[in-house]
Image: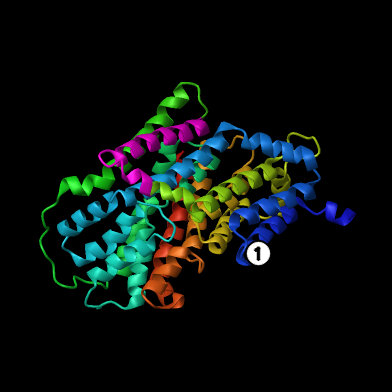
């Protein structure tokens, strides 16, 4: 027992982290897995009731309980866009406007990607199949098109829960987070067109643009724009009123979501009942449990040990890595990458790895360090997620087009490596720029 009690901090965290991943792969829901091993970690550190009380105080802070509200409202907002028919009208309008098969093949998954939903690639897969109605493209190629362009926004688009969580842990203004992460979308889109779309050609021949029904096209886009605008405004204005930066980001998002929901249901209040069926779905509450589990695990990592306020599991782990000569940069790369590969979701790798990543930077790191670490950790985690064989979008798209996962990897590996290269370049640029 004495040997177990004196296991190094990095081994305790690593064992707990591995336990989460193993339990998840064995079928236990990720939220339950995280809660289970957060409890194990609390007992292993010997903090006991004091650790549990610390976690309860953390959960009672506005930054944490409002985050739960934001995630639930985000899920409801995306459901509302679907149930009101707004997203369908926007897609139909753009389809009538864009006549180029190449633009349609990449554009439909990208458009659907603006609306986060579990397995959302299955929503855009029939659209990709409809554009290639003559089946000129191999099934694995269509999988890559649908999968890759579906995910070009998740590096910064504020409707994704993983982005909200990443902003919370990074502790920087929302606008700055969006700014430093946006180049990923540019790189992702360009790499996708070069490596995936280049061989598609202009199948069916080029055609002039059709007539754009602007009102229908904006049906889903303007409520989204309103949400984003109000969220950004809140992140700028509220800190000037004395609110902490993290809380301002979350409160701004709440305000944006309220305004966005009012806009979505304007003129169609009857759709409210159909959208409210979201709250009866098991997946909804699995997501909320996952958010709660991540918050508890994060609190377990930051809980003071042995009454020393400056000592936590993460600070002890950082000191151990430095003593062993392991570069912190390597740790910051591997933890998110492995998390992304095993969980297959951005929310999972952010929640599992970001508390560790930012705690390893020490107290009050400089802005240039935070910006560099943010893009580096997120880029590594996202590449791991894109290549994950358990990523639900990847799995359902392969099932839809009736092809094997390994056949699709040859199309997405090169653009994924481009994202990884961008991750290294951007982190270096931000380190010296800021």
Residue 3, image x, y percentages = 87, 56
- In the picture, measured across the screen, residue 137 lies left or right of residue 140, that is left
Q: Residue at x 60, y 53 (%)?
A: 31
Residue 428, image x, y percentages = 48, 49
Q: Which residue lies furthest to the right in this view?
A: 2
- Front residue of 95 and 184: 95
Task: State the scheme by which the image is colored.
Answer: rainbow
- Front residue of 163 and 272: 272
- In the picture, measured across the screen, residue 300 lies left or right of residue 256, that is right
Q: Is residue 157 visible?
A: no
Q: Residue at x 36, y 59 (%)?
A: 150
Q: Which residue is drawn at 45% across and 69% down?
A: 395
Query: Looking at the image, is 57 positioned above or below residue 129?
Result: above
Q: What element carries label 1?
A: helix
Tell me which secondary structure the magenta stretch mostly adopts: helix
Residue 96: quarter of image: bottom left
**Does the magenta segment cover residue 266?**
yes
Q: Magenta stretch?
A: 245-274
Q: What is the quadrant of the N terminus in the image?
A: bottom right
**Does the magenta segment cover residue 211?**
no
Judge the density around disc 1: few (<14), some (14-19), many (≥20) Cα neighbours within 10 Å.
some
Q: Which residue is drawn at 26% across and 55% down?
A: 88
- In the picture, measured across the screen, residue 144 lies left or right of residue 215, that is right
- In the picture, measured across the screen, residue 406 lies left or right of residue 29, that is left
Q: Which residue in the structure is indicated by mark 1?
A: 22
Query: Looking at the image, is 217 positioned above or below residue 237?
Result: below
- Front residue of 334 and 75: 75
Q: Is residue 188 visible?
A: yes
Residue 336, image x, y percentages = 56, 56
Residue 427, image x, y percentages = 48, 49
Query: Looking at the image, is 414 positioned above or below residue 165?
Result: below
């Amino acid at each position: 027992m004495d040997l177990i009690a004196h296991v190094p901090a990095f081994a305790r965290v690593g064992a707990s982290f591995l336990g989460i991943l193993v339990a998840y792969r064995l079928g236990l829901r990720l939220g339950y897995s995280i809660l289970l091993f957060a409890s194990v970690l609390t007992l292993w550190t010997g903090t006991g009731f004091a650790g549990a009380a610390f976690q309860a105080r953390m959960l009672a802070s506005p930054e944490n309980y409002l985050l739960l509200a934001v995630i639930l409202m985000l899920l409801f907002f995306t459901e509302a866009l679907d149930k009101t028919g707004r997203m369908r009208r926007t897609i139909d309008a753009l389809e009538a406007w864009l006549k180029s098969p190449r633009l349609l093949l990449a554009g439909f998954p990208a458009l659907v990607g603006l609306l986060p939903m579990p397995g959302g690639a299955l929503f855009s897969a029939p659209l990709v199949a409809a554009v290639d109605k003559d089946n000129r493209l191999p099934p694995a190629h269509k999988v890559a098109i649908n999968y890759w362009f579906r995910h070009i926004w998740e590096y910064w688009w504020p409707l994704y829960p993983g982005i909200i969580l990443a902003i919370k842990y990074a502790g920087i203004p929302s606008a700055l987070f969006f700014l430093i992460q946006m180049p990923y979308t540019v790189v992702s889109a360009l790499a996708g067109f070069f490596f995936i779309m280049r061989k598609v050609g202009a199948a069916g021949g080029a055609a002039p643009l059709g007539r754009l029904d602007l009102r229908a096209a904006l049906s889903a886009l303007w409520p989204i724009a309103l949400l984003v605008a109000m969220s950004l405004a809140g992140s700028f204005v509220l800190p000037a009123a004395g609110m902490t930066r993290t809380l301002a980001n979350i409160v701004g998002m709440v305000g944006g979501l309220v305004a966005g929901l009012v806009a979505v249901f304007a003129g169609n209040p009857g759709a409210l009942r159909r959208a409210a069926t979201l709250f009866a779905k098991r997946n909804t509450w699995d997501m909320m449990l996952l958010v709660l589990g991540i918050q508890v695990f994060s609190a377990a990592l930051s809980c003071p040990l042995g009454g020393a306020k400056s000592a936590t599991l993460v600070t002890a782990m950082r000191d151990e890595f430095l003593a062993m000569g392991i570069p912190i940069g390597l740790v910051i790369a591997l933890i998110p990458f492995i998390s992304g590969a095993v969980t297959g979701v951005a929310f999972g790798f952010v929640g599992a790895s970001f508390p560790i990543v930012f705690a390893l930077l020490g107290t009050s790191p400089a802005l240039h360090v935070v910006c560099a670490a943010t893009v580096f950790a997120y880029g590594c985690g996202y590449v791991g997620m894109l290549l994950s064989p358990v990523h639900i979008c990847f799995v359902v798209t392969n099932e839809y087009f009736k092809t094997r996962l390994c056949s699709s990897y040859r199309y997405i590996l090169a653009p994924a490596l481009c994202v990884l290269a961008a991750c290294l370049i951007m982190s270096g640029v931000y380190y010296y720029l800021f």
